[in-house]
């Protein structure tokens, strides 16, 4: 099985991409994280997250039920329950984790074969616009997420693949190619021409092939200290 980890600054469009991926790719389980934050908008307990009180989360830490957990935005706990990994293994499925930079680092230590993907917005202004457009966070919350984004994106080079979520459809195709290419590489069999093409598409998102594309995005976060 392959564990896929996807991280992104909040508002980059990661949830949108993951929803699309899950609709198009079979045999990919999604780990529903536990969190102490409150549900947002139409979020439902057990679907986007398991929303639990802090005391319950800390009990789970005590019982060693988490594969990893972290305090995100210095405010709320988020954690991946071990049971999702076990269940995916039993079902012969791959597992997709939507977790932050700290969680990704913890998993990569425990599961070095995990494939890690970092999603970036095209630039800072677009990120701010998407956060505002989503309309589910307060002004203060948005500000905190933008500040965190600036720090988080500095970690892009700890990831195997970089995906710039500019137009949605090509981004979904690219994400699909990454997942399928990891499966093909693990299959150990001879590949068809179409499968070789999928591998080549995925290679374009490899960290080493993305540095030039990433630089102006990093600059857009560094130049503008959130003022506008
Ligand atoms: P995240 O999960 O990274 O916090 P969301 O998936 O909630 O982000 O996306 C943030 C907002 O941006 C949503 O309103 C979403 O519809 C929109 N969005 C996502 N991807 C794109 C895209 N490629 N182009 C334009 N808008 C997008
Ligand atoms: P949000 O509050 O926007 O849903 O998520 C905030 C951040 O927490 C995102 O970066 C998301 O990837 C991260 N996150 C969600 N679940 C987990 C988890 O189980 N572990 C860790 N470490 N981070 C998580």
Image (tube, helix red, strand yellow):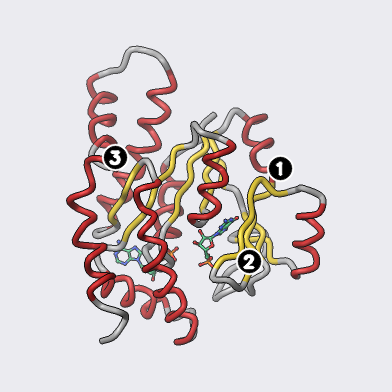
Residue behind mark 3? 206
Q: In x, y percent, where is residue 32?
A: 62, 53
Ligand 1: quadrant of the figure: bottom left
Q: Are marks 2 and 3 in contact (CB under 8 Å)?
A: no
Residue behind mark 1? 83
Mark drawn on residue 198? none
**In front: label 2 or label 1:** 1
Quadrant, the C terminus: bottom left
Q: CA distance from mark 2 to mark 1?
A: 20 Å
Q: In x, y percent, where is residue 84?
A: 66, 43
Asked which secondary structure carries label 1, the reply is helix
Mark 2 vs 1, N-terminal side = 2
Residue behind mark 2? 44
**In front: label 2 or label 3:** 3
Residue in the image at 43% along x and 43% along y: 116
Q: Residues within 10 Å of mark 2 (few under 14, many from 20)?
A: few
Is the CB of mark 3 within 8 Å of ligand 1?
A: no
Q: CA distance from mark 3 to mark 1?
A: 30 Å
User: From the viewer's perspective, is residue 95 above or below residue 211?
Assistant: above
User: For the view shown, which residue lies furthest in the top direction?
Assistant: 190
Asked which secondary structure carries label 2, the reply is loop
Q: In x, y percent, where is residue 196?
A: 25, 24
Is the CB of mark 1 within 8 Å of ligand 2?
A: no
In the shown orientation, is residue 122 left or right of residue 117? left
Q: Residues within 10 Å of mark 3 (few under 14, many from 20)?
A: some
Residue in the image at 25% along x and 50% along y: 170
Q: CA distance from mark 2 to mark 3?
A: 34 Å
In the shown orientation, is residue 11 left or right of residue 4? left
**In front: label 3 or label 1:** 3
User: From the viewer's perspective, is residue 172 above or below residue 179?
Assistant: below
């Amino acid at each position: 099985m392959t564990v896929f980890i996807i991280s992104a600054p909040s508002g980059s469009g990661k949830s949108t991409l993951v929803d699309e991926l899950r609709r198009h790719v079979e045999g990919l389980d999604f780990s529903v994280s536990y969190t102490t934050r409150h549900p947002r908008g139409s979020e439902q307990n057990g679907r986007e997250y398991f929303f639990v009180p802090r005391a319950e989360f800390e009990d789970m830490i005590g019982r060693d039920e988490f594969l990893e957990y972290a305090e995100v935005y210095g405010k709320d706990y988020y954690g991946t329950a071990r049971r999702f990994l076990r269940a995916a293994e039993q079902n012969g499925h791959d597992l997709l984790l939507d977790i932050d930079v700290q969680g990704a680092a913890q998993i990569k230590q425990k599961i070095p074969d995990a494939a890690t993907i970092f999603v970036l917005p095209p630039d800072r202004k677009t990120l701010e616009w998407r956060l505002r457009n989503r309309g589910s966070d307060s002004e203060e919350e948005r500000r905190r997420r933008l500040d965190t984004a600036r720090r988080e994106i500095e970690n892009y080079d700890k990831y195997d693949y970089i995906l710039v979520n500019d137009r949605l459809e090509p981004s979904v195709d690219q994400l699909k190619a990454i997942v399928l290419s990891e499966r093909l590489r693990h299959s150990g069999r001879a590949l068809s021409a179409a499968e070789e093409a999928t591998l080549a598409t995925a290679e374009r998102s490899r960290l080493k092939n993305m540095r030039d594309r990433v630089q102006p995005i990093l600059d857009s976060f560094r130049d503008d200290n959130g003022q506008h």
